[in-house]
Image (cartoon, coloured by chain):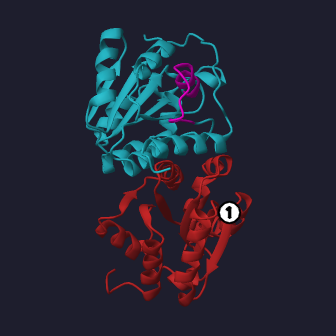
Chain colours: A red, B cyan
Amino acid sequence: MSPKTNHWQDDIWRALKAGHIAQVAYVPDAGHEGLIRAAHADKAITATVLTTEEEGVGLLAGADLGGERGVLLMQSSGVGNCVNAFSLLKVCGFPFFTIVTMRGEWAEFNPWQVPMGQATPETFARAGFLVYRVERPEDAGPTVAAALANAYDSHTANAVLLAQRLVGAKVF
Amino acid sequence: MLERRTAVAQLLAERDKGLLVVSGLGSPTYDVAAAGDNALNFYLWGAMGLALPIGLGLALAQPAKRVLVITGDGEMLMGMGALATTGARRPANLAVCVLDNEAFGETGGQQSHTGLGTDLAAVALASGFVAAATARQDEELATAMAMLRHAPGPVIAVLKISREPVPRVLPVRDGHAIRQRFRSALFSYHGIG
């Protein structure tokens, strides 16, 4: 990854590679910028930009049908866009793995980010996900590795939430 | 106007053994089941708007296989952004067939956007699809089918179908079973268990 990125993003990237992630689907977020750039630069990975986050739920379900592992990168506002799509995961038992950059929880500048940011953990819980929260940089890599294993070895739906305090509050 | 069951039956007649089919919820799923159950059909009964994203993820994972998404106009309209996502990735092995009766057939036949001005073939073409066709009669259907089966993708054919009711043919609706059956068939076909 680029020397500009934080080391915890490098740790996440290494965990994704070690976990044999082949498809990266994303709606961009500044907190995922390094991962997105690395995914596009990696010939072994198919990186797909989405128009809306629920497409990523379908895309990764299709990838699983075809035998590939994937990750959906999005920010917390996108979680609300996915709600009905999550029924696909539950009804069919798809493994699923997403990394979410959190907004609306730590020195948030934009009030429009707060409702979905605050509702994100409960939304995932209600949809039957295993939910992990990363506050400290040193936890990012191990948490992603564990969640990825729970997704693709234990066939569950998993969401890693990267705390806004970790990612850095957006400044205008 | 085309007849939906006949059109889908023709499209799937003597299908290639490796063809992977994703069907959108409602009547397209029944049409695909009526054409002959197959383990390599992934039948959707919900998740409206996700037929094409699922087909796209599958096509990217299995570039050597043809992937055919068969869905309705309402389902495609809900996931219209996926036309742009597909056009951006351009998988050569992906084909989309929209069964377009210009109505929400499962919910009372309310008119849909395709009857109010939206041209899905044009939207797809403008979003980066390689080829698109709209078929209203049998000669056009033959051309559209040849494209769906063989042309380098992504391609889309919009089949204008009548609203005449057809008998329901309901395939398995246990999602775990549908997924497991599909993956077992796909990977044993490859000989990798």
Dividing the picture into quadrants, the one containing residue A150 is bottom right
Residue in the image at 61% along x and 57% along y: A80
Residue in the image at 40% along x and 73% along y: A35
Q: Is residue B120 above or below residue A2?
A: above
- Residue A44 visible at all: yes
Q: Is residue B182 above or below residue A19?
A: above
Seen from the viewer's position, the closer of residues A90 and B137 is: A90
Q: Position of residue A136 (x, y in %)?
A: 58, 88
Does B17 lie within the magenta span? no
Q: Residue flagged by tag 1: what amino acid is it? A: Phe
Q: Position of residue B167 (x, y in %)?
A: 63, 13
Q: Position of residue B40 (x, y in %)?
A: 50, 35
Q: Position of residue A158 (x, y in %)?
A: 62, 65
Instruction: Report the magenta residues as a range.
Output: B29-43
Dividing the picture into quadrants, the one containing residue B178 is top right
Q: Which residue is mark 1?
A: A129
